[in-house]
Image (tube, rainbow, N blue to C red):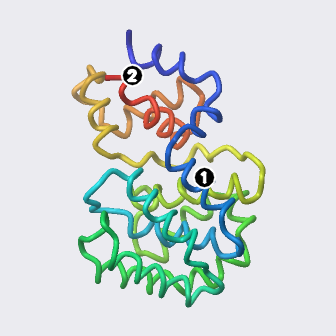
């Protein structure tokens, strides 16, 4: 069976599929086990910018992160940067480039001061968030880390605002090892880039790329 047929069979209710993602489950558990929820969209966004070069799967790292902040409350942006910096110094799964990551957090801080006043606006216009993050971090808005930040913000915002808003179709897919493997298995056109491969699937299934990413993530083993 080709990739379109397989994904079409999995596409009947992508909202439910995404809620099976362990990262979504851990974030939901964090939300319902903290007292001060005001700064947690900022916390998820800040953690997302240092979520690379891990020594575990993303799921295991986000579980560690959520467990830590269930018992370490955040009451302002300064405290958020401080406690997140302390966390990664002690993290079991995020030991690489710690000082570089702390510098990234400090670089993001001025944006978080503004972001916290505009959280719902950014949820309603995630392409704006995609572009603003890229400008702040001086990266392309299609870069994997930028797109991943938007995805993780969306997971949390769904819970925080208690409403479902689809991803904009303009936002790219964050290419990782799993998506690369699927591309290598199913792509028969040597001239087709990995990004165009997923854009074609997105268009044919009429589903935004970031929702497609979540479907593949949750069903990865079934697609191999």
Task: Give the farthest residue toward the bottom.
Answer: 78
Crowdedness near tag 1: few (<14), some (14–19) or many (≥20) residues, C-alpha within 10 Å: many
Q: What is the quadrant of residue 39 in the picture?
A: bottom right
Residue situated in front as seen by the camera: 150 or 83: 83
At which x and y percent is residue 76?
A: 64, 86
Q: CA distance from mark 1 to mark 2?
A: 23 Å
Task: Give the farthest residue toward the top.
Answer: 1
Mark found first going from the N terminus, 1 or 2: 1
Of the 4 image quadrants, the one containing the N terminus is: top left
Residue that numbered label 2 is attached to: 222
Total numbered labels placed on residues in the image: 2
At which x and y percent is residue 19?
A: 60, 40
Crowdedness near tag 2: few (<14), some (14–19) or many (≥20) residues, C-alpha within 10 Å: few
Q: On residue 193, which mark appears?
A: none
At which x and y percent is residue 70?
A: 58, 68
Residue that numbered label 1 is attached to: 155
At which x and y percent is residue 208?
A: 57, 38
Residue situated in front as seen by the camera: 192 or 7: 7
Task: Give the farthest residue toward the right.
Answer: 162
Taking 125 as reference, is 12 above or below it?
above
Residue at image point 51% right, 41% down: 21
Residue situated in front as seen by the camera: 124 or 203: 124
Of the 4 image quadrants, the one containing the C terminus is: top left
User: Regarding mark 1 in the picture, which secondary structure is present there?
Assistant: helix
Q: What is the quadrant of residue 124 in the picture?
A: bottom right
Taking 136 as reference, is 58 above or below it?
above
Would residue 69 appear left or right of 184 to someone viewing this image? Answer: right
User: Regarding mark 2 in the picture, which secondary structure is present there?
Assistant: helix
Residue at image point 49% right, 84% down: 81
Residue at image point 64% right, 33% down: 16
Label 1 with label 2: CB-CB less than 8 Å: no
């Amino acid at each position: 069976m080709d990739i379109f047929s397989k994904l079409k069979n999995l596409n009947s209710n992508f909202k439910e599929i995404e809620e099976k993602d362990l990262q979504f489950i851990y974030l939901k558990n964090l939300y319902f086990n903290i007292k001060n929820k005001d700064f947690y969209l900022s916390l998820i966004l800040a953690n997302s910018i240092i979520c690379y070069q891990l020594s575990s799967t993303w799921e295991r790292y986000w579980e560690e992160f959520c467990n830590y902040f269930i018992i370490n409350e955040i009451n302002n942006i300064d405290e958020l940067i401080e406690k997140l910096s302390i966390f990664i110094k002690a993290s079991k799964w995020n030991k690489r480039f710690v000082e570089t990551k702390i510098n990234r957090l400090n670089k993001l801080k001025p944006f978080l001061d503004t972001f916290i006043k505009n959280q719902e606006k950014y949820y309603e216009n995630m392409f704006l968030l995609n572009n603003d993050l890229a400008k702040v971090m001086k990266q392309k808005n299609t870069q994997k880390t930028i797109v991943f930040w938007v995805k993780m913000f969306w997971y949390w915002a769904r819970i925080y605002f208690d409403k479902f808003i689809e991803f904009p179709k303009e936002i790219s897919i964050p290419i990782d090892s799993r998506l690369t493997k699927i591309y290598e298995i199913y792509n028969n056109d040597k001239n087709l880039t990995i990004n165009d491969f997923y854009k074609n699937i997105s268009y044919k299934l009429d589903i935004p790329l970031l929702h497609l990413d979540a479907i593949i993530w949750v069903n990865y083993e079934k697609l191999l």
